[in-house]
Image (cartoon, rainbow, N blue to C red):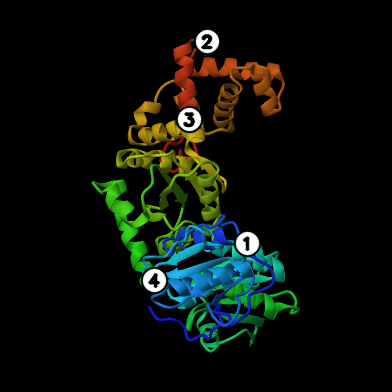
Amino acid sequence: MTAVGTRPGEPIAADLPPPDGMIRLPLLVSARRGWFSVAAPASGLDRPLAGAIPWDPARLPGRHQLVLMTKPRLAADDLAQALTAAGRAGSAALVVREGALPAEADLATAAVPVLVAAEQIEWAEIGTVVRSLLSGARFGGVTPTAAGLCDLAESAALALGGAVVVTDAAFRVLAFGCGESVDALTSEMVLARRVPAELRKRLAQVRSVARLDLPDAGPRWAAPIRSGTTIGGYVLCAPRGETSVAQVLSDLSAAAAAWFIDEPAGRDDEDAIRAELLRGLLTGPGSLEALTERLGTSRRWRLAALGEITPDREGALARCARMLNPNAATATLGSLLFVLFPSTPDPGPADFAERLRRRASTTTPLVACLGRPCATAAEIRAELDPLRHASRVLTAPATAHLTDLLPHVLISELAELAAERPALLDGSLDVLRRDSSPRGAEYLNTLRCWFDAGGDATRAAAALRIHRNTFRYRLHRIEELCAVDLDDPVQRFTIELQTRLLASPLASRLGVEAKSD
């Protein structure tokens, strides 16, 4: 661990004073898993936090500041002095390095909370996260977890009245917010999930908030996202006006910095590993335990399906899913993207599936179907086929629960079986299926409406906008032509099943169509 070269008393957060306003200390503690442990909670952690500053014995620390004890080893007297000063100043907390606390330290009467920072965490990184959270408060209090980066981009787009795009250092689009309108350049970046080559050259030269005049695209504002001395990414915006753009963009880049601290190398490699593990779990003897080593443990999991997608979008959708939920894994099977993620109380899983569906629908509207909670690998595998059929049943872009679609899934599975064994559809309806005149389709539709109405001729006639007597005449003619008795329960059930299979959205796709002589 190396301490930053900041003189005592100077702000440590990205060389800039924190913005006006404060957050609460628990937000910092929970923002980065494994960074902090609580050695002494004092009277409680729920305290205001306004910034971070190194400890200086010669001066009183600031009110609501996070006081950083940057020495690798602390004497008991030094710790006692800092605790007393922090208590008098009303500081938020004292932070010490793991292993730095003296053995004889008594924290039972500490006037402020004492946090222990993990050994591998840099002081500058703590300062970056503090400033990120403070800047994020300007955009509605987004945090560097789950879907926060998407929320941050959307909030900034609303504040600027224009499009905002957040990229990584390789100029791949990680998040975006489009406001009320989207210009051609922003659309190109969002659809391609990458900044165009010419704009990449300009962005690579940006070291602070800058205005870029682009031929045929109008002005853009850009700012680097810094984590210490490293540029982890960029923010680009096309604001409606230019008042306060520089300040908003500065706050936005500072708020986004927390997503780029300790970003593991090889994000695409990690996505590929997760995809192979999930694909093995769904289609073969793959181990759930091997997958949870990378995703973390959970008592229950959910599997969701999105479709239809093209193979070239798998990588971008995997990054999007992991951005919305860091514990998610994705894999494509055929034209469907399957996503496995920890199950949480409702409506959490449905919200995640809908957010991912909307993010994935930038080129073509997609459908999403959410499976049931699963505890074992066998239960997860059992969801695969029902989710496939449910995704095919959905005809309009939406997110639906598998449990709500099970009756339709049954019809879909039977339609697939009928495609393999066409003789299952042979029987009384053959005369209508062979009839190429409008009458054949009209009578099949009459039967479907009658079954939809539960056998109520009045309701069925109203649905077809014909007189009840006309509807009854059609039913009578169907019975005559098909030689069927609709009062017989077995014949009625068989006719209804065949009618619904013929009306299934899968009928033409699976070759279950009307016969022709």
Between disc 2 and disc 3, the foreground one is 3
Q: Amino acid at mark 4?
A: Ala
- Give the CA distance from mark 2 to mark 4: 86 Å
Q: Which residue is mark 1?
A: 141
Residue drawn 49% across the image and 70% down it: 80
Q: Which residue is mark 3?
A: 407
Mark 4 or 1, nearer chain start: 4
Quadrant (top left/top right/bottom left/bottom right) for the N terminus? bottom left
Quadrant (top left/top right/bottom left/bottom right) for the C terminus? top left
- Give the CA distance from mark 2 to mark 1: 64 Å
Please identify the residue farthest to the left as the structure is shown: 285
| Residue 488 at x, y percent in the picture | 48, 10
Quadrant in the rendering for residue 220 = bottom right
Residue drawn 42% across the image and 54% down it: 328
Q: Which residue is mark 4?
A: 100
Q: Is residue 173 visible?
A: no
Give whichever of 162, 423 is nearer the camera. Answer: 162
Q: Which residue is mark 2?
A: 487
